[in-house]
Image (cartoon, rainbow, N blue to C red):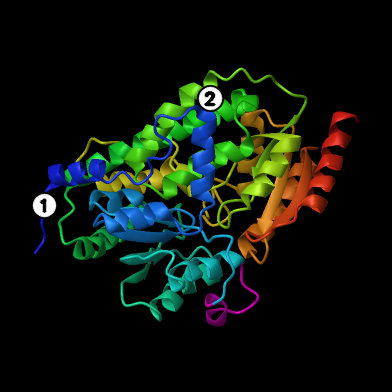
């Protein structure tokens, strides 16, 4: 039997605060607590949510309509691997695949995370097969959300609306309650605010990058995939004014765009190392959380269609979406121009076919525009960055003193 009680659900959410360590702390302590949470591979906030009686939908990179799970009172948990050893998951995959697939499955095999549902996407051959591999080990639903392969079709928004409705029905069965249009609209409002706050954070990165380091900005975004969005909004509303009040002074660093963090995430220490040499004024790290660039309309009679249309019409870009209106090379050049960057750091995760393929196209486009770039490769389990940092410092010095 489906149960509908939105007011009670909202009250339960507010009572289930899972990340309180930052409350009442000064800015540096808040950022420290965020770093600690992001680097904690036991995912304590997800555990606290479940201990309070909550349910969890795990969703793989890059984009997922989290509003649907949120509207059911569930926690949408962003599954993006972890810097852990794939002790059990290695036997489920070939050795030639990217690390994020193995470590994502390892999170549940090692019981670091428990889920009620898992959803992946056909962003590459490996990710498309992840649901089947996952489902061989668990009895809960493990599904593929088929985002439109042809984003330019006049029917793509209606098709995607149907996919979202299929996902909604599956979530309703797990949650034991109906997701109404009012529920969806309320969740859209929460996520609209979240994306607006993230845009303000990125505006600070672009306009005054000396006020927030690359790694601190990253953890402020990353935390959002580990906690309820209401909590993330509260955190950002508190932190953003504090960042603007900082008395930090501008340093002699070049402004760069970081490209290549759309799926597997680079180690936090690598982002920190880059930030020691450059101001990272824009990037595609965790782009799924910032995919929709404008508020999703709350008016109209069909919130699912509004959400589907926003995915297609007012969205960012990545190597895993094929949209003729958004050629990746031109979009990267636009990102560089709009952010006032002087150079680009073009990276890819090891064994990532979409990322490595786009590197070639990106470098051709950058060469044509005479824009300097640094090519790199990373893996989430990297622990040594000395060689890469020396190369990057040499690259930066060449630009500064050329």
The image quadrant of residue 203 is top right
Indicate the quadrant containing the C terminus: top left, top right, bottom left or bottom right.
top right
Residue at (76, 50) in percent of width and height:
375
Dot label at residue 78: none
Would you name the residue on which mark 2 appears?
Answer: 243
Sequence-earlier tag: 2 or 1: 1
Of badges 2 and 1, nearer the viewer stands: 2
The image quadrant of residue 163 is bottom left
Height in image: 82 above or below 184?
below
Height in image: 21 above or below 75?
above
Residue 281 position, x and y percent, is 63, 33
The image quadrant of residue 282 is top right
Q: Which residue lies furthest to the right in this view?
A: 402
Q: What stretch is highlighted in magenta?
A: 88-98
C-alpha distance separating marks 2 and 1: 40 Å
| Label 2 residue SS | helix
Indicate the quadrant containing the N terminus: top left, top right, bottom left or bottom right.
bottom left
Residue at (80, 37) in percent of width and height:
370
Residue 72 position, x and y percent, is 23, 53
Q: Bin the neighbour count of mark 1 within 10 Å (Cα to Cα): few under 14, some 14-19, many 20 and up.
A: some
Q: Does the magenta stretch include residue 93?
A: yes
Residue 65 visible, this angle: yes
Horizontally, is 395 left or right of 319 in the view?
A: right
The residue nearer to you, when weighing 9 against 196, is 9
Residue 362 position, x and y percent, is 70, 49
Would you name the residue on which mark 1 appears?
Answer: 4
Horizontally, is 18 left or right of 394 in the view?
A: left
Residue 314 position, x and y percent, is 43, 40
Give the main secondary structure of the magenta stretch.
loop
């Amino acid at each position: 039997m489906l149960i509908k009680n939105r007011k009670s659900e909202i009250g339960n959410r507010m009572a289930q605060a899972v990340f309180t360590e930052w409350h009442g702390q000064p800015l540096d302590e808040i950022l420290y607590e965020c770093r600690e949470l992001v680097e904690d591979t036991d995912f304590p906030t997800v555990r606290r949510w479940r201990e309070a009686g909550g349910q969890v939908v795990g969703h793989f990179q890059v984009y997922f309509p989290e509003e649907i799970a949120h509207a059911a009172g569930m926690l949408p948990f962003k599954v993006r691997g972890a810097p852990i050893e794939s002790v059990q998951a290695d036997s489920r995959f070939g050795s030639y695949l990217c690390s994020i697939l193995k470590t994502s499955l390892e999170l549940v095999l090692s019981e670091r995370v428990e889920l009620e549902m898992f959803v992946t996407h056909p962003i590459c051959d490996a990710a498309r097969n992840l649901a089947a591999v996952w489902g061989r080990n668990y009895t809960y639903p493990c599904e593929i959300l088929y985002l439109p392969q042809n984003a330019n079709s006049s029917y793509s928004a209606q098709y995607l609306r149907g996919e979202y409705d299929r996902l909604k029905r599956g979530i309703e069965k797990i949650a034991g309650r109906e997701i109404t249009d009012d529920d969806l609209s309320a969740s859209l409002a929460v996520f609209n605010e979240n994306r607006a706050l993230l845009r303000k954070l990125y505006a600070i990165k672009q306009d005054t990058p000396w006020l927030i380091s690359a790694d601190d900005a990253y953890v402020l975004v990353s935390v959002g995939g580990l906690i309820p969005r209401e909590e993330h909004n509260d955190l950002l509303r508190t932190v953003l004014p504090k960042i603007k009040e900082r008395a930090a002074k501008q340093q002699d660093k070049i402004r760069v765009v970081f490209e290549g963090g759309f799926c597997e995430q680079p180690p936090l220490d690598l982002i920190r190392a880059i930030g020691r040499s450059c101001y990272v004024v824009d990037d595609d790290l965790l782009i799924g959380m910032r995919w929709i660039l404008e508020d999703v309309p709350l008016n109209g009679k069909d919130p699912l269609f509004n959400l589907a249309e926003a995915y297609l019409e007012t969205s960012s870009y990545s190597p895993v979406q094929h949209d003729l209106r958004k050629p990746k090379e031109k979009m990267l050049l636009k990102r560089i121009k709009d952010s006032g960057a002087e150079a680009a750091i073009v990276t890819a995760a090891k064994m990532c076919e979409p990322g490595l393929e786009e590197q070639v196209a990106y470098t051709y486009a950058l060469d044509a525009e005479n824009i300097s770039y640094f090519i790199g490769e990373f893996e989430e389990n990297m622990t040594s960055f000395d060689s890469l940092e020396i190369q990057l410092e040499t690259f930066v010095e060449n630009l500064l003193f050329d």
